[in-house]
Image: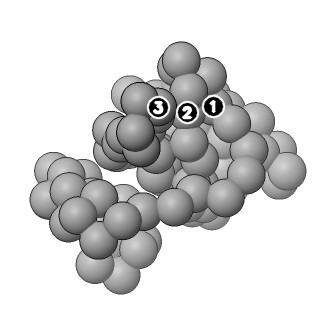
Amino acid sequence: MASKTATPWGAADLVEEVVVRQQAGDRRFASVVQLLETPKGERLVRFAYTTDDTARRGPVTFRARDLARLRTQLAHHPALAEELGL
């Protein structure tokens, strides 16, 4: 999964990613939680949401059932779960 991404701290590699698909009325979107690592080994966790597969800035909101799905998916992404303390 190693792909480069830009952060305010410079370039980082994408280590793990969880995508939680969501819907509000007719709107479909997804929230994304990513584990990133800088060239110096610092780990960063990024939260974002996407519409039409384009990352957006702004607040990320999870309903309780979305958080349950996030926890389930984190079982397959142990490094990201560890950084989140879950």
User: Is residue 41 in view?
Assistant: no
Point 46% across, 31% down: residue:
27
Q: Nearer the viewer, mark 3 or mark 1?
A: 3
Q: Amino acid at mark 3?
A: Arg
Against 84, residue 80 (above or below) is above
Check disc 1 and report the residue beneath it. Answer: 55
Spot occupied by residue 80 in the image (x, y as percentages of width and height): 36, 60
What element does badge 3 sit on?
A: strand
Point 42% across, 44% down: residue:
24
Q: Residues within 10 Å of mark 3 (few under 14, many from 20)?
A: few
User: Is residue 7 in view?
Assistant: yes
What element does badge 2 sit on?
A: strand
Against 21, residue 47 (above or below) is below
Tell me whether circle 1 and circle 2 mark residues in contact (CB < 8 Å).
Answer: yes
Q: Which comes before the other along the chain, label 3 or label 1? A: 3
Check disc 2 and report the residue beneath it. Answer: 50
Spot occupied by residue 7 in the image (x, y as percentages of width and height): 77, 45
Q: Which mark is residue 27?
A: 3
* Distance (Cα) linking label 1 and label 2: 4 Å
